Image (cartoon, helix red, strand yellow):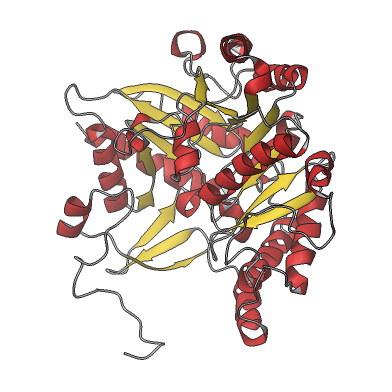
Amino acid sequence: MTATTKISRPNDLSAFWMPFTANRQFKQTPRMLVSADGMYYKTDDNREILDGTAGLWCCNAGHKRPKIVEAVKAQMDELDYAPAFQMGHPKAFELASRLAQLMPGNLNHVFYTNSGSESVETALKIALAYHRARGDGQRTRLIGRERGYHGVNFGGISVGGISGNRKTFGQMLGGVDHMRHTYLPEENGVTRGMPEHGAFLADDLERICALHDPSTIAAVIVEPVAGSTGVLIPPKGYLERLREICTKHGILLIFDEVITGFGRLGAPFAVDYFGVQPDLVTTAKGLTNGTIPMGAVFATDEIHDAFMTGPENMIELFHGYTYSGNPVACAAGLATLETYEEEGLYEKGKELGQYWEDAVHSLIDLPRVKDIRNLGLIGAIELEGIEGFPTKRAFSAFLKAFEKGILIRTTGDIIALSPPLIIEKSHIDQLFGTLRDVLKEID
């Protein structure tokens, strides 16, 4: 088999243990994607599938974008790999500078990772090391939130609050606690945009501070919009209150923007959208438009500078990855940022927000639709579960949707939608017209 051989139908499915997948079900009836362009995937049986999820929340500029494709090709001819330990290459510094320019305030420093999970681990480690560097080594506690998703490494599942991601993996990290989640279905059901009620939920952090002593807490990590748990929108005033409490007690606030970063809400980041500045921000996914694995952590001047002490020949932070700032990933990242800026994709969620919102909420009249939530170009349709068979109804919708030519994502009995930001009104009509038919047909 040559390097250019195209494989559309593999002859064996057993070797690949697929992630977050019902492997036995999939391998009985495989769903194979073999190419993509713009808003559409193409299957091995030559059907077009409208991408309603931007891959996995990551292909924000759509698929096979020329500038990104050419940048990756050219970089492979120029420099395929360069070590990141004690060495550098120009594009890593150029990309970091452009990323820092996107962030408001003093979030001026970028540490490269390879995924959202690694970004979370990195941010948690930086938070712990920062307090130690300042003489506050007793600050070792990490606070997450129920229903939070922060990747799948041990730090991420420890501060995360989705039981299915935690229950089979033992004791987790010690010294971790969780705030209440922000979902109040009775008060905020079927809400358009940010719910009115629930800012008081941030005060749960004060309860945890009273329990553990705030001087032992290093950081609080939250998703500005909780995505993978089923799109939970923060109530008005909630994030502002969380910032106030963290500042009051000297606790670092980490925003996990792996999903909300790079235009998903109609602004470059949730930091911009909500006007609340954290101390650390984790990103990945949209950073390279899903083309090459890459993540990044933004840190404030204060955090970065706390490490820049002691002898100049000494390593300041004993942390990093073989592929931190990989040249090909940096080239993809630079081209991705240019694509977002040239095509105005950071603002697309604002421009299409109302049309998208109306389309999402148009499904509320359907039977078995329990709740609907939206913000920017994100939507969630929560279905009534089947007693004794959790997730079955939504998974049936996923299979039927693929059969009818749209890609949706399900989590529990919730359908989550997050299309590429190049989506047009005609695509929105197709997506929700088809989804309406799907929901009418499933049991």
Vertical placement of residue 432 versus 334, above or below: above
Q: Is residue 297 visible?
A: yes
Vertical placement of residue 255 versus 117, above or below: above
Q: Which of the two residues, 178 or 398, is positioned nearer the viewer here?
A: 178
Quarter containing the C terminus: top left
Q: Which of the two residues, 19 or 88, is positioned nearer the viewer here?
A: 88
Give the x, y percent position of residue 411.
36, 36
Total marks shown come to 0
Vertical placement of residue 280 versus 387, above or below: below
Quarter containing the N terminus: bottom left
Give the x, y percent position of residue 441.
23, 36
Give the x, y percent position of residue 325.
66, 65
* Location of residue 358 by image quarter: top right
Q: Residue at x 54, y 69 (%)?
A: 64
Q: Which of the two residues, 17 or 407, is positioned nearer the viewer here?
A: 17
Q: Residue at x 54, y 37 (%)?
A: 378
Give the residue furthest to the front. 311
* Location of residue 134 by image quarter: top right
